[in-house]
Amino acid sequence: MPSEISYVEGPAISPAELAGLFRASGINRPVDDLARLAKMLAHANLVIGAYLDDRLVGVARALTDFSYCCYLSDLAVAREWQHCGIGRELLQRVKRRVGDEAMLLLLSAPAAMGYYPKVGFENVENGWIIKRAR
């Protein structure tokens, strides 16, 4: 992992900055809808940013009760910094912050399905979804 990377809990991320990171990471998010990204940031209660100097190169965004459940809604790292341990470190920081009593769950993009078992997640088959309209 690069030593120049710093991690900040609760950073002031602008919607445009988040859109730029999502574009750089390849994650599929509504990057052209800055109002929606603003709501995504405003209503997440755990956000950890990874920075190279002042540039956002990674983010973990979650919704949690810090007691029983944590839904990791975004884990994104700029492509040029992928495979350097940044995603793994973001996950570790989320897990430490929510504690051992809370489970960590997520929905994976198809392209990332192979990543999550490598960082300690196990597949579950007892889930359901009502997909968003847009």
Image (cartoon, rainbow, N blue to C red):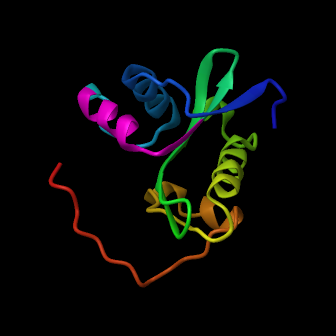
Q: Is residue 110 left or right of residue 50?
A: left
Residue 129 at what x, y percent from top left? Answer: 28, 71
Q: Is residue 105 left or right of residue 87?
A: left
Measured along the vertical axis of the image, is residue 16 above or below residue 46? above
Residue 76 at what x, y percent from top left? Answer: 54, 41
Residue 61 sits inside the magenta stretch:
no
The prevailing secondary structure element of the residues shown in magenta is helix
Residue at point 75%, 28% (across, down)? 5
Q: Is residue 3 left or right of residue 80?
A: right
Residue 96 at what x, y percent from top left? Answer: 70, 55
Task: Return the residue found at the far bottom.
Answer: 126
Where, by quadrant of the figure, is residue 4 drawn? top right
Residue at point 23%, 63% (across, down)? 131
Residue at point 47%, 38% (across, down)? 26
Where, by quadrant of the figure, is residue 121 drawn? bottom right
Residue 36 sits inside the magenta stretch:
yes
Q: Nearer the viewer, residue 113 or 86?
A: 86
Region of the chain picked out in magenta, as a range:
35-48
